[in-house]
Amino acid sequence: MIMSLRNLKSGSNLKATFMYTGIRVKDLEESVKFYTQVLGMKEKGRSDIEASGGKVVGLVSKEGGPELELNYYGKGSRFAVGYSTGEGLDHLAFQVDDLEKALEEAKKLGHPVALEMKTNSSKWAYIQDPNGIWIELFA
Amino acid sequence: MIMSLRNLKSGSNLKATFMYTGIRVKDLEESVKFYTQVLGMKEKGRSDIEASGGKVVGLVSKEGGPELELNYYGKGSRFAVGYSTGEGLDHLAFQVDDLEKALEEAKKLGHPVALEMKTNSSKWAYIQDPNGIWIELFA
């Protein structure tokens, strides 16, 4: 009943489909290293975007999974403005097999746990990426 | 050759899988309205997160597609700190059937185009969500 109502209310003519999330990074190789070597993502492709003077790297954890795009704006790009991480992006969430082991491994790689959360039935934790973006890890 | 090297370098023991993107929103219902009524996403579920004093709403464009989580921290939550959109999140990208029609429709719904980009072979544009998050539309 509630679902039908919700569907009815989605009456936009845009027919938009959410495709990927683009984060901005201050150092492209440092972020590629974090997402591939710490979180095990794979590079899907790289492009220079002439129109923005930027570079993008597409990353996925697995074929067909959600894509993360790293956006880098170098000197001369009109988008190379000051960087504050901000609150727009709350977090990026990654599932792991074993939370304790994952946190140990992340710590070894220079990304110690920043915050642990617990309820009666579940537990999750955050580490931070090289730009201060919160990465949620949950099992 | 390069792919093999890249795969070899992904030697993390974390075995993490990127699952979803969480954005922070200042007004939960206003953002639900934007993502469902303007961009046509569907609510997948809602939860109160006791541990954070927050509320979350999961949204997808289609079953099995990437998930967007709206995170709201109300009064009393230790995460209800000041909000600046920031640069951590560069943009969220949505594919549309017809870019011109989509931009017209978005404008009618109160979200005029904020930036148009063009190359010889492609064209895309941005509108902004209620919190100033950049939404890329491309066909």
Image: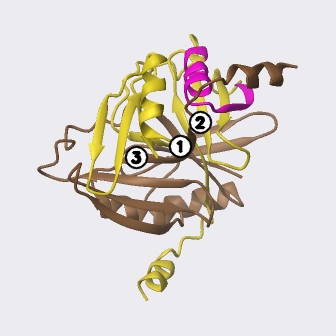
Chain colours: A yellow, B brown
Labels 1, 2: one chain: no
Question: Pointer 1 and pointer 2: residues touching (CB < 8 Å)?
Answer: yes
**Residue A24 pos. (x, y %):** 51, 28
Instruction: Single out the residue that lies furthest toward the bottom.
Output: A1
In the depicted structure, whether residue B51 falls above or below residue A44: below
Circle number at residue A97:
1
Q: Name the N-terminal-most of marks 3 and 2.
A: 2
Identify the magenta region.
Answer: A29-48
B83 horizontally vs B62: left or right? left
Tell me if residue B9 comes above or below residue B79 in the rendering.
above
State the quadrant of the N terminus of chain A: bottom left
Verify whether residue A44 appears in magenta. Answer: yes
* Callout 3 secondary element: strand
User: What's under tag 3, amino acid-wise?
Assistant: Ile
Give the amino acid type for the residue marked by disc 1 in the picture.
Asp
Q: Which residue is mark 3?
A: B23
Q: Which mark is residue B15?
A: 2
Q: How many C-alpha atoms fall within 10 Å of the one at disc 1: few (<14), some, or many (≥20)?
A: some
Q: Chain of mark 1?
A: A
